Amino acid sequence: MASPTPHEVPDGRGAAPVPPALAELLRAQLKSVADEVEEEVRRQVPEYARPADDTERKRLREGVVQALTLFVDHIADPCDDGESIAATYYELGRGTAVQGRGLDALQSALRVGGMHAWRLMGRTAEDLGLDSTVVAALGEIAFRTVHEVAEAAAAGYAAGQLRSTDELERRRKRLLKLLLGGDPVASEAVQDLAHHARWPVPRRIAVVALATASPDQREEGLSPGMAGALVDMESRPPRMVVPDPDGSGRWAGRGFALALRGRPAAVGPTVPVTEGARSLRVAARALGLMGRGILPRQGVVRCADHLSTLLLHSDEPLLDDLRAHALRPLDTVLPGQRARLAETLLAWLLSGSNVPDVAARLHIHPQTVRYRLRQLEKLFGDALHDPGTRLDLILALRAESLHTRTE
């Protein structure tokens, strides 16, 4: 468990010998020295000024006593590797990481405590009349001790971070599964799981469905700029939950598209945090329409900008029935003529029956528009002036134009 000692850190083994009897004398003073070192750490390191609870106080005290014990053990036996004490500091560092705290406070405590212990124990050596080489040797042993326990704590912290990161990732995946699992979920369940996943619960969310990398492309993660989002790149399609999408520029514009590394994506509607499954369903439908060219194939498509298209394609067999029924009169004309008449009819309906406007939209002469409208009047008759029929025609012709564009 003991860590290798770098060349610049004295290991105490080539230093002037320290009388073994001094170790026993210092061991007898260990409790009083521990009291002073603990007090000095609390005074100089703000994080330890007022330990949060009894467990924290005991942990600080145990760490001080263990480090002082290792110091004295090195005096008594310079070859002792202090493995058990190093294991204690390994666990101390690991626990610090698992609790989500930084290592700086622990390292500061080690430096402050080590220097103070050296001063106290060096003073004892001077009081005994031991020469300066012994005091210097004590200093080298103190530095070696601090280095060993600091290395053990750092190794434990690294292991704890890895474990903490893995556990946090598992919790966030469970949270994502809960949010997107189907029916609306209980707010209390979201709050509880989000707390353990360290995810601040927003008021509203949107789900982003991402295009899957093609077989000849390397699957890449997202930019670190996605911090705050819950991401699952293993699902099909990959998806992510973004918090408060309408309240910040983070999830909009070019910056968001760049963070997706050019991956096409559909942003579902903004919904309460308990209704993520609904946003996912719409986003996944939009992503499918992007793949077919009905919605733009590239970039970021926001479902809020294409609600009528999404509604039209929410039940495609029914949409096909509507097209067949509403546009049956056009079945009697040639394909090329059908396309021109359908285009003119849709423009006429959308422009409020304004012929000059239709001509401007289609870049044709108004007389051409009037000629086509006479043909349409023959095909559809009075139905062209029925409000219900006009709505059906708009929906059917809109679907027809999208279908024609993708062929």
Image (cartoon, rainbow, N blue to C red):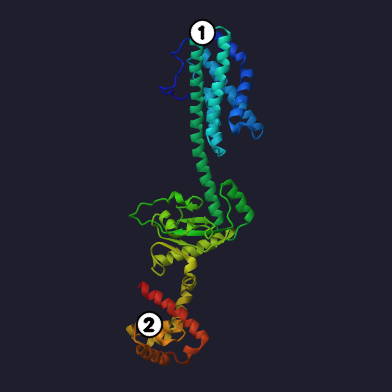
> 357 or 13: nearer the eye?
357
Return the residue at label 2.
360
> 379 or 303: nearer the eye?
303
* Residue 353 position within the rendered picture, expressed as x and y whole percent measured from the top left: 45, 86
> 309 or 19: nearer the eye?
19
Which secondary structure, mark 2?
Answer: helix
Q: Check whether the beta carbons of the residues at disc 1 and disc 2 lie within 8 A of each other.
A: no
Earlier-in-chain disc, 1 versus 2: 1
Dot 1: few (<14), some (14–19), or many (≥20) neighbours within 10 Å? few
Residue 124 visible at all? yes
- Furthest residue in direction top, as rendered: 129
- Residue type indicated by callout 2: Ala
* Residue 101 position within the rendered picture, expressed as x and y whole percent measured from the top left: 55, 38
Q: Is residue 287 above or below residue 118?
A: below
- State which quadrant residue 331 falls in: bottom left
* Residue 64 position within the rendered picture, expressed as x and y whole percent measured from the top left: 59, 24
Return the residue at label 1.
131
Which residue is found at the position 49% from the left and 82% from the top? 392
Q: How many marks?
A: 2
CA–CA distance between discs 1 and 2? 104 Å
Which residue is found at the position 48% from the left and 28% from the top? 151
Q: Is residue 154 above or below residue 337?
A: above
* Residue 5 position within the rendered picture, expressed as x and y whole percent measured from the top left: 44, 23
Which secondary structure, mark 1?
Answer: loop
Image quadrant for the C terminus? bottom left
Dot 2: few (<14), some (14–19), or many (≥20) neighbours within 10 Å? few
Disc number for residue 200: none
Q: Is residue 198 above or below residue 104?
A: below
Which residue is found at the position 57% from the left and 38% from the top? 99
- Residue type indicated by callout 1: Asp
Residue 77 visible at all? no
Q: Is residue 378 left or right of residue 114?
A: left
